[in-house]
Image (cartoon, helix red, strand yellow):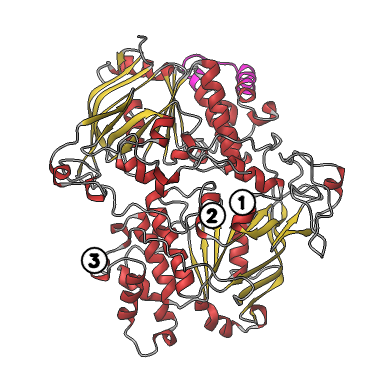
Amino acid sequence: MSATPADPARSPADPARSPAVLRATGLEVVHRTRSGPLHAVSGVDLTLHERRTLALVGESGSGKSSIAKALLRLPAPTAGTVTLDDTDLSALTSRQLRALRPRLQMVFQDPLSSLNPRRTVRDLVAEPLDAHPGLLRGRDRLAVADEQLTAVGLPPELFGDRRPEQLSGGQAQRVAVARALAAEPRVLIADEAVSALDVSAQATVLNLLRRLTEERGLASLFITHDLGVVRAVSDDIAVLQLGRLCERGPTEAVLAAPAHPYTAALLAAVPEPGRPLGDTGLLPADPPSPLDPPSGCRFRTRCPLADDRCAAETPAARPVGPGRTVACHRPLLPVLDRAGFGSAPVPAQRP
Amino acid sequence: MTTPVLDVRSLDTVIHAPDGRRLHILHDVSLHIDAGECLGVVGESGSGKSVLARTVLGVHARTTRAESTGQVLLNGEDLLAAAPARRADLLGTGIAMVHQDPMTSLNPVVRIADQVTESLTNRRRLPRRERLRTAAELLAAVDVPDPVRRARAYPHELSGGLRQRVGIAAALAGDPVLLLADEPTTALDVTVQRTVLDLLDRHRATRGLATLLITHDIGLLYGRARRIAVMYGGRVVESGPTEQVTERPAHPYTAALLRSVPRVTGPLRRVLPAIPGSPPDLSRPLTGCPFAPRCDRAEAVCATVAPPVHRAGPAHTASCHFPLAAEAPRPSQTSLERTP
């Protein structure tokens, strides 16, 4: 699929008017490990809106994938609620939850390991229809599969009879997307869905996910560690650091002027042609183990601005702009009071 | 002119795959690296960049048989023509490699100290105490905190960033003249990637180490590599100084690659310009330009005649029938604006 020209009229849905589809409140995920409990996710709130993409960003061990699994109840979160179109998923019986499953679809990092190598592409895409025959509504399952393959830019007459090993990485990932679409989801979760792809294939899949989110009214969650990808694919960003959200807001605003020193460091570390190497400002400490996170702010051991308060108190999320919050005692932007005026002093310098 | 540390001349490599296919992977690859210089090799999967590194080292996957023609000169001595014993000697003291995934390149049941010092103990016996001391020194040189304790650890006890530093320490232990780094930071987080690349930079500069940095991420080479070689379909399609190649690419493939990279700076692009089509199938003979089927500038001649070498500037060349003019608008609105 080649790039389609940008349509200026096609703008992402307004967050104020776009209905919330999936809401997660107070999400906690604790894994039991041999070395004791591991708090992978602590007190995370997320909302996914129709026709919008939220990017969840963080380094390895930040809890990105744990959140994705908790939203799908694979397994259920240790604490917190997840509602889909105002239905509390934890209140459902397993039969009701199963009936709801097609509404929540996921695309994984490695398409070749998530597709059964012995089945044809057409069969793979039709598989959700076998598990949930109600989705057919009298249509032929292979006709539905062909329709979804067309939607992801893979002509069914060329690709329908192939097997996964006969596909490139980008094509396999598009098959995975077509298969998710066949279930007619409300929510699409993509976990590092383009990380294993070459740059040229990556662009195709990103364009596709963005287009489908808008055309099909999906509420998308895009999990990645790549801020360039975040900017290309998302409307909103949530930055995760050791299981806690440290900053969130509209993607362009956050990347133009990060409020959290961690977001600023991630941004400065991105290598890009034509951009001088920036200083991340991070202290020369390795990321701490999620098994033994630092007290107070979990970023403080790497933070150039950290002081005593950061070790003593866990920072709460505070507003720093329209739709933006930051959880930091020493944010890089002034914190707004209710009336929208800056009330905290601006720190002398950003890291 | 001084002799380059590595001088690859007209290298062709054919791999006989276990399924009987004959894959002509490298075509007339020529490149050189001087002491203390970093050459970046950028390419997507299937471009031949990893086979290039393996051919220089003379190691290929166990199930394949490779045949190479051309020359691979290490300090002027041809590795392809050298007798096996001489070759082993040249490789052992001359070239070291840093791999992509330190979890799979390190032996999980051998202590860090023994792995870091392996290139030394291969040559002479080192008493255990001395081995631990040497290992701690080598680990300290790559900024591993608490090196004495880490030397006694096993790979699984270290984070990904630390493991990669152990990999670098092991590579530097034999005091090589050439370091091959194949996607050394792909498995690492972006902040850790930065520190590992800074570390490689530091050792390149202080030891005068020639470095071949192989990556799929052209952005990573900016500010690191002095020169870039862009590979496509097993050929070097463009090479030149990093700034020139990234800001005024002459080959349409380089330009398309730069355009399709999602960026954190510059104007917001809601639709990324993807490159249509797929890379060439290396098991089929190919005439003409390997990029022709995907190229928006291609004409009939591109499919039939191998492209000539176009000189885009001093030390900047591109193999293309219809190269982009130097004064053409910059690709992808390359914005030099910094983030605020």
Residue B112 is one of the magenta-drawn residues? no
Q: Label 2 to label 1, Cα distance in Å?
A: 8 Å
> What residue is rendered at 37% in x and 65% in y?
A175
Q: CA distance from mark 3 to mark 2?
A: 33 Å
Name the amino acid, label 2: Arg
In the figure, B38 relative to A124: above or below? Answer: above
| Residue with the mark numbered 2 | A231
In this view of the protein, which residue sits in the foreground, B43 or A40?
Answer: B43
Indicate the secondary structure of the residue bearing disc 2.
helix
Judging from the image, mark 3 belongs to the subunit labelled A
| Chain ID, mark 1 | A
Q: Is any part of residue A139 visible from this angle?
A: yes
> What segment is highlighted magenta in the picture?
B119-137
How far across and down, in percent of the image, does residue A193 sit? Answer: 47, 58
Q: How many marks?
A: 3
Earlier in the chain: of badge 3 and badge 2, it is 3
**Does residue B50 lie above or below A100 as drawn?**
above
Helix, strand or loop under label 3: helix
Q: Specify the amino acid type for callout 3.
A: Leu
In depth, the one of B170 and B152 nearer the eye is B170
